[in-house]
């Protein structure tokens, strides 16, 4: 049984690293594409940036949720829980920004 736990913990650690790497790369790509759109004076630059940030943040939050299976003590659970709540709040703010940008775009058309 210990062997299975070691394998599952190792697999979970690699999955967390991969998921968080994807999230970081998505945020970096969103910022670069947002800057390019900004320099081209694209009216949808903020909307594109917000969507990319939201997607990257979702991956980072997924990594944190997966991390909860590795945590064995209460303090670790509290830290992971606080990170999930913080990232969840950020995601809500970004989605609120996306909705307001989309409504503004509809009004302008």
Image (tube, rainbow, N blue to C red):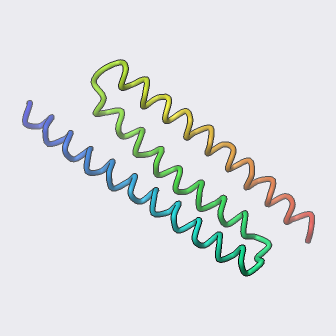
Number of labelled discs? 0
For this view, does 30 lie left or right of residue 39? Answer: left
Identify the image quadrant of the N terminus. top left
- Quadrant of the image containing the C terminus: bottom right
Residue 9 is situated, as x and y percent measured from the top left of the image, at 21, 39
Q: Quadrant of residue 53?
A: bottom right
The quadrant holding residue 89 is top right
Residue at x 47%, y 52% (from the top left corner) = 59
Q: Position of residue 44 (x, y in %)?
A: 75, 70
Q: Seen from this angle, which residue lies furthest top?
A: 74
Left or right, 17 with respect to 60, comes to left
Residue at screen point 45% across, 63% down: 25
Residue 105 coordinates in the image, percent (x, y): 85, 65
Asked which quadrant contains residue 66, the reply is: top left
Q: x, y percentage for residue 29?
A: 52, 68
Residue positioned 43% across, 23% down in the render: 78
């Amino acid at each position: 049984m210990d062997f299975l736990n070691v394998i599952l913990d190792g697999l979970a650690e690699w999955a967390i690293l991969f998921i968080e790497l994807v999230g970081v790369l998505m945020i970096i790509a969103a910022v670069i594409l947002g800057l390019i759109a900004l320099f081209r004076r694209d009216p949808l630059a903020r909307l594109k940036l917000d969507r990319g940030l939201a997607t990257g943040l979702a991956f980072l939050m997924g990594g944190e949720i997966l991390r909860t299976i590795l945590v064995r003590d209460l303090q670790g659970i509290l830290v992971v829980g606080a990170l999930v709540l913080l990232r969840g709040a950020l995601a809500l703010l970004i989605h609120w920004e996306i909705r307001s940008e989309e409504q503004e775009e509809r009004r302008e058309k």
